[in-house]
């Protein structure tokens, strides 16, 4: 079987396509999205990201945690050597995860595996792409390599997710080729307030833009420093033109519900699970909360007896990940 196949197909020996070549796989109905990101078009990459819509992505630091996340219902995992709360605690320079660990996690699960590259560090992204990750997170949680120049994501076949605090940041990252946007929040704090602030900012700025006429919209595009066509598409849709997830400080099923009710398409959860008293149960409860976010009775049941939540720190007291 070809090593160029996505890991979700390669690692399933019972799959009907496990022994097919990539060209043969392309002809199998229902398998278009998982492999087509190899062609690298933005439409295909953003389509792959759409597959995560309505899901939860969990940070994991080893294969065992990845299996816990998959069993709990995660739609993908983020492979990290240290979760954000540990990065905050230990300080120092935070870099790309060891490729050996990434490969171990890829081999342990059947769901997509993501990994982080430093902002502007296109060489780390190149390495992650050849490792076969399903998405690269150009992440402010790691120490930026080039805070003046983000990665040109159009040059890559693998899709990217990027953080944003407002509409301008979101549309600039999309114009660079990001297939998914997430709120920056304050990862590793257990404080959801910044994620809420960023989600509301993006939503309110889109509503504002929808009230502008063409000349005003052109001026607003210049203020935001974004291409006019990307802003026009956003106004037309009434939302970002790519999948928009919440991230940063989510620690409870109620946090998940709050952000989902604010209109995000899914959530990232990191330190809030594996630094809590009962990671497996909390992971399952938070995955269920994505589905039942609009059902307070179900959320109350999901919130019972989860063990101690991560202690966390208020976002205002945390070192800011830019």
Image (cartoon, grey):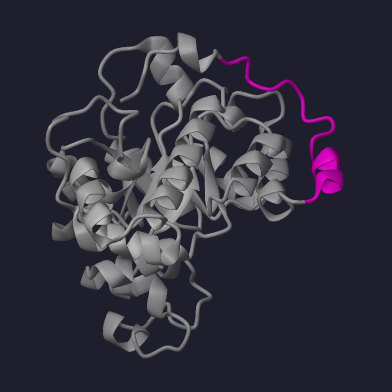
Principal SS element in the magenta part? loop
Q: Residue at x 44, y 25 (%)?
A: 84
Residue 10 in the image: x percent, y percent? 40, 68
Quarter of image, res 239: bottom left
Query: Is residue 158 visible to us here?
Result: no
- Left or right relative to 81: residue 284: right
Query: Is residue 21 visible to us here?
Result: yes
Q: Residue at x 17, y 30 (%)?
A: 147
Q: Nearer the viewer, residue 126 or 266?
A: 266
Residue 233 in the image: x percent, y percent? 32, 65
* Quarter containing the C terminus: top left
Quarter of image, res 92: top left
In this picture, which residue range is highlighted in magenta?
Answer: 295-312
Q: Is residue 4 magenta?
A: no
- Left or right relative to 155: residue 99: right
- Left or right relative to 48: residue 153: left
Q: Is residue 300 magenta?
A: yes
Q: Residue at x 16, y 45 (%)?
A: 151
């Amino acid at each position: 079987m070809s090593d160029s196949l996505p890991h979700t197909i390669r690692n399933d020996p019972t799959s009907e396509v496990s022994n097919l070549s990539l060209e043969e796989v392309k002809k199998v109905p229902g398998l278009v999205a998982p492999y087509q990101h190899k062609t690298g078009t933005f439409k295909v990459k953003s389509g792959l990201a759409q597959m995560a819509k309505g899901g939860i992505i969990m940070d994991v630091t080893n294969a065992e945690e990845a299996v816990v996340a998959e069993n709990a219902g995660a739609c993908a995992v983020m492979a990290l050597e240290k979760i954000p709360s540990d990065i905050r605690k230990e300080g120092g320079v935070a870099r790309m995860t060891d490729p050996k660990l990434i490969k171990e996690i890829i081999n342990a699960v059947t769901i997509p595996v993501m990994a982080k590259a430093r902002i502007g560090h296109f060489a780390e992204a190149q390495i992650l792409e050849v490792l076969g990750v399903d998405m690269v997170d150009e992440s402010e949680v790691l120490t930026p390599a080039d805070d003046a120049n983000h990665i040109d994501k159009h040059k890559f076949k693998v899709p990217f997710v990027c953080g944003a605090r407002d509409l301008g940041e979101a549309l600039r990252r999309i114009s660079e080729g990001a297939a998914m946007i997430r709120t920056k929040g304050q990862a590793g704090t257990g404080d959801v307030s910044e994620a809420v602030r960023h989600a509301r900012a993006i939503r309110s700025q889109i509503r504002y833009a929808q009230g502008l006429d063409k000349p005003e919209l052109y001026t607003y595009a210049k203020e935001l420093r974004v291409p006019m066509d990307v802003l026009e598409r956003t106004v037309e849709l009434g939302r970002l033109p790519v999948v928009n997830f919440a991230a940063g400080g989510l620690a409870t099923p109620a946090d998940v519900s709050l952000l989902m009710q604010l209109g995000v398409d899914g959530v990232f959860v990191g330190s809030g699970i594996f630094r809590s008293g009962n990671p497996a149960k909390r992971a399952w409860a938070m995955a269920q909360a994505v589905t039942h976010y609009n059902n307070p009775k179900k959320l109350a049941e999901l919130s019972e007896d989860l063990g101690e939540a991560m202690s966390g720190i208020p976002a205002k007291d945390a070192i800011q990940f830019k």
